[in-house]
Protein backbone atom coordinates (compact mmCIF):
# COMPACT_ATOMS: atom_id res chain seq x y z
CA UNK A 1 0.00 0.00 0.00
CA UNK A 2 2.78 2.40 0.87
CA UNK A 3 4.55 1.77 -2.43
CA UNK A 4 1.31 2.28 -4.34
CA UNK A 5 0.87 5.65 -2.59
CA UNK A 6 4.50 6.56 -3.27
CA UNK A 7 3.85 5.97 -6.99
CA UNK A 8 0.71 8.15 -6.92
CA UNK A 9 -2.10 5.59 -6.70
CA UNK A 10 -5.39 6.24 -4.94
CA UNK A 11 -5.55 3.43 -2.41
CA UNK A 12 -8.54 1.77 -0.76
CA UNK A 13 -7.32 -0.58 1.96
CA UNK A 14 -9.39 -3.31 3.56
CA UNK A 15 -8.53 -4.41 7.10
CA UNK A 16 -10.08 -5.31 10.44
CA UNK A 17 -11.25 -2.56 12.76
CA UNK A 18 -8.23 -2.87 15.01
CA UNK A 19 -5.95 -1.88 12.11
CA UNK A 20 -7.95 1.02 10.65
CA UNK A 21 -5.92 3.77 12.35
CA UNK A 22 -2.62 2.09 11.45
CA UNK A 23 -3.63 1.86 7.80
CA UNK A 24 -4.79 5.48 7.75
CA UNK A 25 -1.49 6.57 9.31
CA UNK A 26 0.35 4.78 6.50
CA UNK A 27 -1.47 6.84 3.87
CA UNK A 28 -4.52 4.96 2.59
CA UNK A 29 -7.02 7.27 0.91
CA UNK A 30 -9.97 5.09 1.95
CA UNK A 31 -10.13 2.39 4.62
CA UNK A 32 -12.81 -0.30 4.79
CA UNK A 33 -13.25 -2.25 8.01
CA UNK A 34 -14.25 -5.69 6.73
CA UNK A 35 -15.88 -6.52 10.07
CA UNK A 36 -18.45 -3.74 9.43
CA UNK A 37 -18.67 -3.44 5.66
CA UNK A 38 -18.37 -5.87 2.76
CA UNK A 39 -16.24 -4.13 0.13
CA UNK A 40 -17.47 -6.62 -2.47
CA UNK A 41 -21.00 -5.19 -2.18
CA UNK A 42 -20.05 -1.52 -2.54
CA UNK A 43 -20.34 0.80 -5.51
CA UNK A 44 -16.60 1.51 -5.69
CA UNK A 45 -14.76 0.47 -8.84
CA UNK A 46 -11.15 -0.64 -8.90
CA UNK A 47 -8.48 -0.91 -11.60
CA UNK A 48 -6.23 -3.15 -9.52
CA UNK A 49 -7.05 -5.42 -6.61
CA UNK A 50 -4.13 -6.79 -4.60
CA UNK A 51 -5.25 -9.55 -2.26
CA UNK A 52 -2.52 -9.86 0.35
CA UNK A 53 -4.27 -12.53 2.42
CA UNK A 54 -5.86 -14.48 -0.43
CA UNK A 55 -9.09 -14.95 1.47
CA UNK A 56 -11.78 -13.87 -1.04
CA UNK A 57 -13.01 -16.24 -3.72
CA UNK A 58 -12.77 -14.64 -7.17
CA UNK A 59 -16.54 -14.61 -7.56
CA UNK A 60 -16.73 -12.31 -4.52
CA UNK A 61 -14.25 -9.72 -5.69
CA UNK A 62 -15.18 -6.05 -5.41
CA UNK A 63 -16.65 -4.32 -8.45
CA UNK A 64 -14.07 -3.65 -11.09
CA UNK A 65 -13.83 -0.84 -13.58
CA UNK A 66 -15.73 -1.25 -16.87
CA UNK A 67 -12.39 -1.32 -18.70
CA UNK A 68 -11.54 -4.53 -16.90
CA UNK A 69 -9.29 -4.89 -13.92
CA UNK A 70 -6.33 -6.83 -12.68
CA UNK A 71 -6.58 -9.06 -9.62
CA UNK A 72 -3.24 -9.97 -8.06
CA UNK A 73 -2.99 -12.57 -5.33
CA UNK A 74 0.11 -11.81 -3.30
CA UNK A 75 -0.13 -14.41 -0.58
CA UNK A 76 -2.27 -17.30 0.52
CA UNK A 77 -2.16 -20.88 1.61
CA UNK A 78 -1.50 -23.31 -1.24
CA UNK A 79 -5.06 -24.61 -1.69
CA UNK A 80 -6.44 -21.06 -1.88
CA UNK A 81 -3.58 -19.97 -4.15
CA UNK A 82 -3.81 -22.55 -6.94
CA UNK A 83 -7.56 -22.44 -7.58
CA UNK A 84 -7.70 -18.70 -8.35
CA UNK A 85 -4.69 -18.95 -10.65
CA UNK A 86 -6.31 -21.76 -12.66
CA UNK A 87 -9.75 -20.13 -12.62
CA UNK A 88 -8.11 -16.80 -13.38
CA UNK A 89 -6.55 -18.13 -16.57
CA UNK A 90 -10.04 -19.02 -17.84
CA UNK A 91 -11.51 -15.70 -16.64
CA UNK A 92 -8.74 -13.81 -18.43
CA UNK A 93 -9.62 -15.56 -21.68
CA UNK A 94 -13.34 -14.72 -21.58
CA UNK A 95 -13.42 -11.25 -19.95
CA UNK A 96 -11.34 -8.10 -19.89
CA UNK A 97 -10.30 -8.93 -16.36
CA UNK A 98 -6.89 -10.31 -15.61
CA UNK A 99 -5.99 -12.62 -12.73
CA UNK A 100 -2.39 -13.22 -11.81
CA UNK A 101 -0.12 -13.95 -8.87
CA UNK A 102 2.89 -12.04 -7.63
CA UNK A 103 6.32 -13.37 -6.89
CA UNK A 104 8.98 -10.87 -5.91
CA UNK A 105 12.19 -10.84 -7.91
CA UNK A 106 15.29 -9.51 -6.21
CA UNK A 107 16.71 -6.52 -7.98
CA UNK A 108 19.52 -4.33 -6.58
CA UNK A 109 18.08 -1.17 -8.15
CA UNK A 110 14.63 -1.74 -6.62
CA UNK A 111 16.13 -2.54 -3.22
CA UNK A 112 18.19 0.67 -3.34
CA UNK A 113 15.05 2.65 -4.25
CA UNK A 114 13.15 1.01 -1.39
CA UNK A 115 15.97 1.83 1.06
CA UNK A 116 15.96 5.47 -0.09
CA UNK A 117 12.19 5.68 0.42
CA UNK A 118 12.53 4.18 3.92
CA UNK A 119 15.36 6.59 4.77
CA UNK A 120 13.23 9.51 3.51
CA UNK A 121 10.26 8.37 5.63
CA UNK A 122 8.06 7.72 2.57
CA UNK A 123 7.75 4.08 3.58
CA UNK A 124 7.54 2.98 7.20
CA UNK A 125 8.26 -0.67 8.04
CA UNK A 126 5.52 -2.01 10.31
CA UNK A 127 6.70 -4.59 12.83
CA UNK A 128 3.98 -6.28 14.85
CA UNK A 129 6.13 -8.40 17.15
CA UNK A 130 9.70 -9.55 17.63
CA UNK A 131 10.56 -13.11 18.70
CA UNK A 132 13.89 -14.69 19.66
CA UNK A 133 14.80 -17.80 17.66
CA UNK A 134 13.95 -20.00 20.63
CA UNK A 135 10.31 -18.87 20.30
CA UNK A 136 9.84 -19.61 16.59
CA UNK A 137 6.94 -22.03 17.30
CA UNK A 138 5.11 -19.22 19.14
CA UNK A 139 5.78 -16.86 16.23
CA UNK A 140 4.42 -19.38 13.74
CA UNK A 141 1.27 -19.93 15.84
CA UNK A 142 0.72 -16.17 16.01
CA UNK A 143 1.23 -15.87 12.25
CA UNK A 144 -1.16 -18.75 11.54
CA UNK A 145 -3.84 -17.08 13.67
CA UNK A 146 -4.06 -14.55 10.83
CA UNK A 147 -4.03 -11.27 12.72
CA UNK A 148 -0.48 -10.00 12.22
CA UNK A 149 -0.43 -6.25 11.56
CA UNK A 150 2.77 -5.82 9.59
CA UNK A 151 5.67 -8.22 9.90
CA UNK A 152 7.10 -10.53 12.52
CA UNK A 153 10.82 -10.27 13.21
CA UNK A 154 13.03 -13.11 14.44
CA UNK A 155 16.12 -12.07 16.37
CA UNK A 156 19.27 -14.19 16.36
Image (spheres, rainbow, N blue to C red):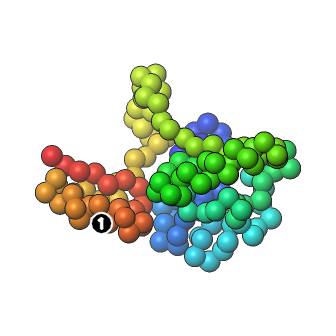
Side (left or right) of 46 relative to 1: right
- The answer to whether residue 78 is seen in the rendering is yes
Q: Residue 63: percent from the left, percent from the top? A: 77, 59
* Residue for point 23% across, 51% down: 154
Residue farthest bottom in this picture: 36
Residue drawn at (67%, 72%) of the image: 38
How many tags in the picture? Answer: 1
Would residue 13 be found to the left or right of residue 143 on screen?
Answer: right
Using the image, determine if residue 67 lies above or below residue 33.
above
Residue drawn at (48%, 36%) of the image: 104
Does dot 1 land on a helix, a strand or a loop?
A: helix
- Residue 49, relative to residue 43: is it above or below? above
Identify which residue is drawn at 37% across, 53% down: 151
Q: Is residue 68 left or right of residue 85?
A: right
Residue that sits furthest to the top in the current view: 109
Any part of residue 50 in sight: no
Measured as percent of width and height from the top left, residue 58 is found at 67, 58
Q: Nearer the viewer, residue 146 or 3?
A: 146
Mark 1 closeness class: few <14, some 14–19, many ≥20 residues within 10 Å: few
* 116 left or right, relative to 44: left
Residue on which the image places disc 1: 141
Vertical placement of residue 54 versus 32, above or below: above
Location of residue 135 in the rendering, given as x and y in whole percent from the top left corner: 17, 60
**Residue at the limit of the structure toward the right, as seen here:** 66
In percent of width and height, residue 87 lies at 67, 51
Examine the image and state in which quarter residue 5 appears. top right
Residue 30's image quarter?
bottom right
Amino acid sequence: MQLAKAFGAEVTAVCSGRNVELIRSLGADHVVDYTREDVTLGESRFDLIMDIAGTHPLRQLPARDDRGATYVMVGSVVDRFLRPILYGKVLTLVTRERVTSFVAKRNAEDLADLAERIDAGQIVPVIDRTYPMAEVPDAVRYLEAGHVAGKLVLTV
